[in-house]
Image (cartoon, helix red, strand yellow):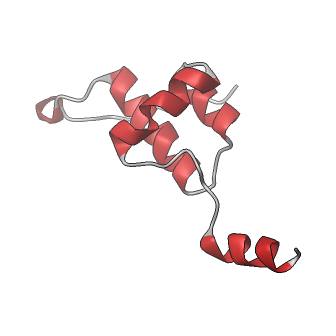
Amino acid sequence: MKRLTLTIPDHFDLDERETKRFLAAKMFESGKLSLGQAAELAGLSKVAFSEILADYGVSLINYPPSDISKDAAKF
């Protein structure tokens, strides 16, 4: 397992748990992590993680419109 150390100034007043969840949500949104990987990073089950995505402005349905058009053209 890799370990990442991030030094955050005290005046930012960031909570470690909240920061992990935010990072996981945004990495899921960008396609860098799958739902399962992001949930693991956040320390949550897939169901629990999917329930908090909206708190970070992230949609559970992470499917680019271009892919939807391509898939629709197949039918």
Q: Quadrant of the N terminus?
A: top right
Q: Quadrant of residue 14?
A: top left
Measuring from the top left, give residue 4's x and y in whole percent: 52, 33
Q: Quadrant of the C terminus?
A: bottom right
Measuring from the top left, give residue 40's x and y in whole percent: 62, 25
Whether residue 37 appears in this view of the structure is yes
Looking at the image, which residue is at 69% across and 32% down?
A: 36
Whether residue 3 appears in this view of the structure is no
Number of residue marks: 0
- Name the residue at the front extreme: 75
Q: Is residue 69 above or below residue 50?
A: below
Q: Is residue 32 above or below residue 47?
A: below
Looking at the image, which residue is at 59% across and 50% down?
A: 61
Q: Nearer the viewer, residue 48 or 7?
A: 48
Q: Left of 49 or right of it: where is 17?
A: left
Q: Left of 11 or right of it: where is 60?
A: right
Looking at the image, which residue is at 33% across and 34% down?
A: 7
Q: Quadrant of residue 53?
A: top left
Q: Nearer the viewer, residue 4 or 36?
A: 36
- Name the residue at the left extreme: 11
- Name the residue at the right extreme: 74
Q: Quadrant of residue 63?
A: bottom right
Measuring from the top left, give residue 72's x and y in whole percent: 78, 74
